[in-house]
Image: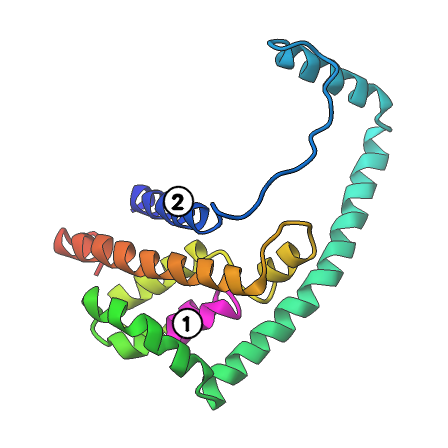
Amino acid sequence: MVYASDYLYRHCDYCSYSTISLVDDSVERPTLDHKRGTRLAAAFDLGLSTSRRATDLKTILWSNFRDGLTMAAAIVPSIIAVGLTGLILAKYTPVFDALGLLLYPFTWLSGLPEPLVAAKGMSAGLAEMFLPALLLSEADILTRYVAGVISISSVLFFSAMIPCVLATEIPLSVGKMVIIWFERVVLSILLAAAFGHLAMYFNWIG
């Protein structure tokens, strides 16, 4: 099933590329000071010059450790806050129920035992990537497998990935990223369910 997941991930990436293919990606590229055909040599020289300017190993390790703590302190609260908000919305509001209706035709077409419940649970992945696996942890084995795949392959979620993209100069709006998320989830449902049925037929899972 490792190969199946890799196949699924690559096809979802193609879906994302097709969605943003019309976005203007023109950029002013710096003039390179090496001749054509000497990129490897130029990269090797640049790597050597960079390594010569590097500090000692102890300083590098401490700097990386400190930066990691700073990043964790900045990211973990947002993940917890958005994840908790997603759980509250999923339990006490019809937000993900309405969003799940958009996924229902695909969960039904994929032959999941409880397609509406599965669609509602998988739609929660827009808030936090692991919510589908959490909300559908008591479902049947096929639905749990598809939810697990979607938790990884959807990639875009509001607790981390979408704010990170918005903080960069990448010309992607929230609306475009939601569309990309929807396309990835739809493809993930269809492909993961197909591989899941095949795996159950050969008793690989079950």
Depth check: give the residue in front, 75 or 35.
35
Residue at 85%, 28% in the rendered image: 56
Q: Which residue was labeled with disc 1? A: 123
Depth check: give the residue in front, 101 or 65.
101
Depth check: give the residue in front, 46 or 81.
46
Give the answer, above or below, for where 192 lies relative to 136.
Answer: above
Q: Residues within 10 Å of mark 2 (few under 14, many from 20)?
A: few
Depth check: give the residue in front, 204 or 86.
86
- Give the mark toward the camera: 1 or 2: 2
User: Position of 57 compared to 144: left or right?
Assistant: right
Residue 14 - label: 2
Highlighted range, magenta: 120-135
Residue at 69%, 51% in the rendered image: 168
Measure how far apart labels 1 and 2 are at the Cα level: 21 Å
The quadrant of the rendering that contains the C terminus is bottom left
Amino acid type indicated by mark 2 = Tyr
User: Position of 194 compared to 159: left or right?
Assistant: left
Amino acid type indicated by mark 1 = Ser
Residue at 39%, 82% in the rendered image: 97
Q: Does residue 47 appear anywhere in the picture? A: yes
Give the answer, above or below, for where 185 lies relative to 15.
Answer: below
Give the answer, above or below, for where 203 lies relative to 94.
Answer: above
Q: Does residue 141 appear anywhere in the picture? A: no
